[in-house]
Image (cartoon, grey):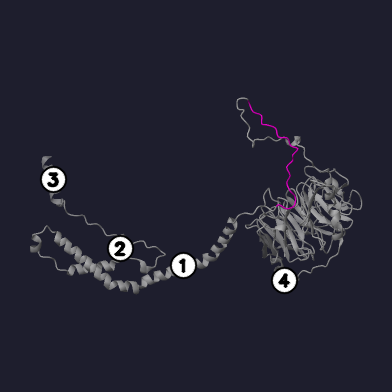
Amino acid sequence: MARRSARFAEKLAKSSPVKIADTPVKKKTTIREYFKAPDPYVSIEKLDIESPQKKLLVKQELKHEPEPSLDDSSESDGSDYQDGITSTRKKSIKENKNQNGRQTNTALSEYEKQIQQNIEERKKMFQELVGAAKDDFMNIISAENKEKKKAVQRGLKRKVDESIEVTPLRMSLRSRKPLKEEFVSMKDEDERKVNTPKNPKGGPFTLADAYLDQESVEDSKFIEEMIPLLEKEGELEKLPADQQDFLKLMRSFSIREEGVAKVTKSRIYSMAWHPSNSKLLIAACDRDGNIGFWDIDKHEDKHQGVRAFRVHKQPINCATFDKFNPMRLLTTSYDGYVRCLDMHSNVVDEVYSIQRTKNTWTAYHAQKDPSTLIVSQSNGDVVVVDVRTKPGKVENVIHCFEMSARTVSLHPQDDNLFMTCNRYGELGIFDMRYTSNNDDELADPVISFPKAPKGVHGAFFSPITGQYALITCTDDTLKLYDVQKGKAEVECIKSISHNNFTGRWLTSFKAVWHPQREDVFIVGSLEHPRRVELYGAPTGTLLHNFSGAFLGTVTSINAFHPTVPIFAGGNSSGRVNIFRS
């Protein structure tokens, strides 16, 4: 065992190299010693980088330098030798910089020229791509960062009900402290005394009984004073026939401060222009059953030409002036009533009604002739009503869908055909002369449409020939159909992507045609800054955006005047915005 250990020690001594403690360890050179990370937007001429070639030249010069003699260095401790090498190296580096500096600054290498060219090209490309978008973005930001203007306080004003008694809070003796002014308690809704106008369930009533917040008897005579001007026939203003000329006129439209007023108490559901061109009068209807009239040019009035009346108890989804007697206003509400306001007598009379239930109500109407009205209902039926009888007599019932018939639109060339839709994506063109022995049997449509993926808010014929059908869908699309191709099931000729998700607090969008044209239609928008969009048909191209400093909300309901170049947009706070040239 001792012999084996001795052999192993001998062998280990022969194989292990002799290590010198003072021998320095040679470090590996890395690429980081030669290169630095330059700024990509700094030109090459400004970079102070010592390239490997320069270091190689310095080393070669140092090799040819004469070394100092040992005799001279014997008297010193070796520091002079080190100083000589350092000074010689600094001198060579300085000379090398003087010789090659001009060449580096003036004449770049091909590689450096290529880098500089790439940097300049990228800068130029960045300015071209981002410059225009940056300007647009900054314009939007600057517009939004401007001091926001307060809502225009025109039209109806909010009033504080002074009849409400303020009682102190109920507190225990332990926690009772002196009450602060901001702590007040309100009575329950059923205990509050609210002055609401009389609104009978059925039968006729006068506007004096329906006037909201009346201050004097003269306020109820608001409409009587306008009758002479509404019946006056003024000069008709011809609209441009060419679309480009019409678009030039639309681009001149703007909104002013006097063109904004609060016309109804709550969210606007429908609007209608009186066809007179001598007096501009618009009727706006809201979710509480109120009708607000606005004489838009009556600026000196105490309410800026606005009066509101309570005619229904639930939202008025459709309002139209009688095509054969413009002094009559027809309204259809979710409360199950279709009513008519006669401006001559200031009397609101019942035209048609159904028993309002949880699943049954009236939704929309369209007028065929002076004595015939068609009304859609939530149970999927469309009824033909004879308005000469009081109340209106139902002449025919067309069972179009299982549930939820929404808008109704009559064909302008054949008034026996109408188009309707429902919340489940179904729509079709039906004949009002259709009869069936079975009441539960669905009517066969004259022309059927492909079922939409989601619900349909509105479906309307183009107003001149009825060739196109304009559909507003809840799947965020606006669709155009050509219904005169002679096919049993029509095909969509244009589908426009449009954000129609208005949500709970905004009225649903309904794209509508211009009353005198079938090559343009208008619809609200959820985009910022707030706008109203004008599209062309049948191409579906966006022609113009109506916007302005005084338009700060979404106008869900929009309507063109039938004879004058002007249009109005209603929002969900009861305000009406007027755009005119």
Element type at marker 1? helix
Q: Label 3: few (<14), some or many (≥20) within 10 Å?
A: few
Residue 271 at x, y = what percent? 77, 55
Q: Give the residue at mark 3.
A: 9
Determine which residue is flagged by label 4.
245
Q: Nearer the viewer, residue 172 or 236?
A: 172
* Location of the C terminus (image quadrant): bottom right
Pointer 1 local density, CA inside 10 Å: few below 14, some 14–19, many at least 20: few
Dot 3 or dot 1: first in sequence order is 3
Residue at the extreme top: 173
**Which secondary structure lies at badge 3?**
helix
Q: Position of residue 187 (x, y in %)?
A: 72, 35
Q: Earlier in the sequence, mark 3 or mark 4?
A: 3
Residue 212's place in the image compared with 56, above or below, is above
User: Where does label 2 land, which residue?
Assistant: 34
User: Is 191 in front, or is 43?
Assistant: 191
Badge nearest the viewer, 3 or 2 = 2
* Inter-mark Cα distance, 1 to 4: 42 Å
Name the amino acid type tagged 4.
Asp
Direction from residue 392 to residue 289 in the image, left or right: left
- Provide the residue span drawn in magenta: 153-172
In-front residue for pair 476/322: 322
- Point 14% across, 68% down: residue: 66
Q: Which mark is residue 123?
A: 1
